[in-house]
Amino acid sequence: MQLERTTFFAGLELTIAKRRRSLITRPLKLNSKFTTRKNPTKLLRHCYSSAGVLGNATRIIAILLSLFILISANGKLSAQENASRVFQIDGVLIEGNRNVDTAAIKKQLSFTAGSISAEQIADEVKLIYETQFFDQVTASLVKGYGSENRSMLKYELVEKPLVRKVFIKGNEEIEDGELSKILSFGSQRFLDKTKADALVKAARIYYQSQGYYDAELEYSVVPVGDGQVDITFSVDEGDRIKIRDVSVRGVREVDEDDLLDEIETSDYSWWSSWLLGTGRLNRETLEADKVKMRQFFLDNGFVEATVGEPAIERKEDGIYVTFYVEEGEQYDFGEIEASGDLIEGDQGKTLEGLKSETGDTFSAAKLRDDAFRVSDKFSDVGYAYVNVVPNTRIDRSAHKVDVNFEVNKGDKVKVRRIIIKGNNKTYDNVIRREMQVDEQDYFSSSKIRRSQELLQRSGYYEEVTISNEPTDQKDQVDLLVNVREGSTGSFSAGAGYSSAEGALFNVRVTERNLFGTGRSANLNLDVGDERNNIILSVDDPRLNDSHLALGVDLLRTDREFSDFDRVLEGGSVVLGYPLEEVFGESFEDISASMKYELLSIEISDVDPEDAAQLVIDSEGESTSSGITPRIRRNTLNHPYDPTDGSLQEVSFEVTGLGGDEEYWQAEGRQSLYYPLLESE
């Protein structure tokens, strides 16, 4: 059986091989009808093979050049005739691929059987090249494949080398893990010079963003066999350049220091830069600082101010950064109006409570906040999709900005369903009881925000989001409560020794969300030569899903002092209730509680020579019974790891209610939390 292969270049076909009983072909001679005075086959093969190395743009040039040479060499055959030549194929063969799956390659092709023209074959070759996995693609027609009348279109591929390993050397200040994220070839890991050059450029830009302006990177490729290579990125970081001065040019009315206080970029300081990371040039920070400067101008009435690209000047002692600005004129608020849907048709009620006032210095921040205030007035009474647009008109002659809040309240909607997701441990009711809006209630944005705040402050979740989900009914909406649960349990054990107390062993077990019920339990156990304690406490912040809080403590402590021994046994019960449920929103975050404590006290083995007279008088058994009313205001954003908010409480303890001990004491407590260093 005779096999015939025709190889295609640039949409033209050349019959270049004939061989009996073999699928392996090699160049012999040109078919008579393509005979030319030169050898276009050799020239075309050279151009096409080179294209795989030179890249996409050069590859296209090589293909077009091949087409031009062949047409010039054969005056009898036009390019259109060759491109439109049609072949019948029974299938497609893929050869030469080692790491790329054959099925994946065929999936890229438009033709796998049937009629196909030379021009379409060239397009198919281009599709394979576009995968960026191959350095060379050759298409050929193999006739007599399997049977005399069977023809196959074969693609012979030369894969790009596969990157086996990536090494990074020379970096000292920037960690390997950070650079590896940048110098990554992705999941396919085929070596592409264009890709490698782009990675080097990206890494260099990153170094410059971190203040290493002299950083240089290059790479080397080492073949390791089996079509694989190792690539090594060599880094010369250079010195991290310090910012010696940051200045602003163009300010007239605004104080330069006030403007510089708004931005992150600052001079290098030996006493603070090592701690806060300031005084180093970062291009991303510079871009953010431009936005902050622009916002500062807008918030201070300079509505037409512009902030140009900062100039960076490199000197021997460091970098000098200069921001160039144009303030323009300062503007005040002009007329403030509302249009569209108004509250009870009254403009005054719609604008009531806004911070922006006519005659005040214009502030974009105030305007934005007031737009939210107007929006909340509608979204609090069911208009979930209200749209408030603060339209502004600049009056340059009067240096005023007139504002019109255009309101489109949309449809009034109710909450159809509350959908809870992410609670793998916590029961649904523990989440639902904190929701300030119920199913079939009208939508309320303030109640939803309050619900999210209460859920976050419970301490059970690392993240809480509440979003609106449209339904097929325009007057209904679903609320999606998505929580990401955090760790709520802890266990610790320890041992120690001291000359005063001897050996001591300690175990502490805490669970703040016991079995997903929202209850907390704590066990504290001390065992030692001189001290033995056990304290067990259980708290339920929402007893039976009500607003009543219940806490129970049980304890026994046994302590041996040098001049007497003391044993305490007893417990306490605490009931609490939020005053907001009694007196309304004005008492938000304020709660009242009452504690009753009963203790049995035994003093024994008193040394009359060393013990204090009070201890001597207390020898024997006694009882302490008392109550402690407490008022607490708590706005902490987290009960166990707060970063914001405050806590104030006042308590008054009175004993003597049927016991032997009689005393009273008053206590006050104030805590304020504010983040000193905020992470990005």
Image: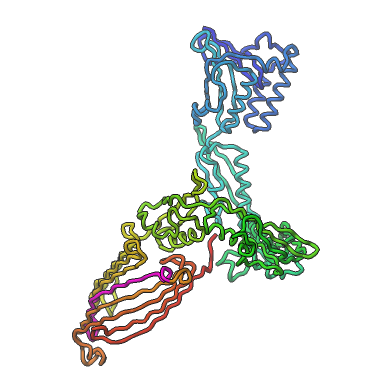
Q: Is residue 36 above or below residue 224?
A: above
In the image, what residue occupies the spot 59% across and 21% down?
139
Rendered image quadrant of residue 376:
bottom right
Which residue range is magenta in the image? Answer: 557-582
In the image, what residue occupies the spot 63% across and 17% down?
117
Of residue 496 and residue 432, the one placed in the foreground of this image is 432
Q: Please say whether residue 578 is one of the residues in the magenta stretch.
A: yes
Rendered image quadrant of residue 16:
top right
Of residue 201 and residue 433, the one placed in the foreground of this image is 433
Residue 519 at x, y = what percent? 33, 62
Of residue 517 and residue 402, the one placed in the foreground of this image is 402
Q: Is residue 463 above or below residue 186?
A: below
Q: Please say whether residue 313 is one of the residues in the magenta stretch.
A: no
Residue 462 at x, y = what percent? 44, 58
* Number of marks in the rendered image: 0
Q: Is residue 40 above or below residue 497?
A: above
Residue 413 at x, y = what percent? 51, 51
The reply, left or right, for residue 396 in relation to residue 258 is: right
In the image, what residue occupies the spot 41% across and 66% down?
640
- Does residue 311 appear anywhere in the picture? no
Colour scheme of the picture: rainbow
Rendered image quadrant of residue 639:
bottom left
In the image, what residue occupies the spot 74% across and 11% down?
76
The reply, left or right, for residue 23 in relation to residue 205 is: left
Dominant secondary-structure state across the stretch colored magenta = strand
The reply, left or right, for residue 223 in relation to residue 281 is: left
Residue 148 at x, y = what percent? 52, 8
The reply, left or right, for residue 378 in relation to residue 447 is: right
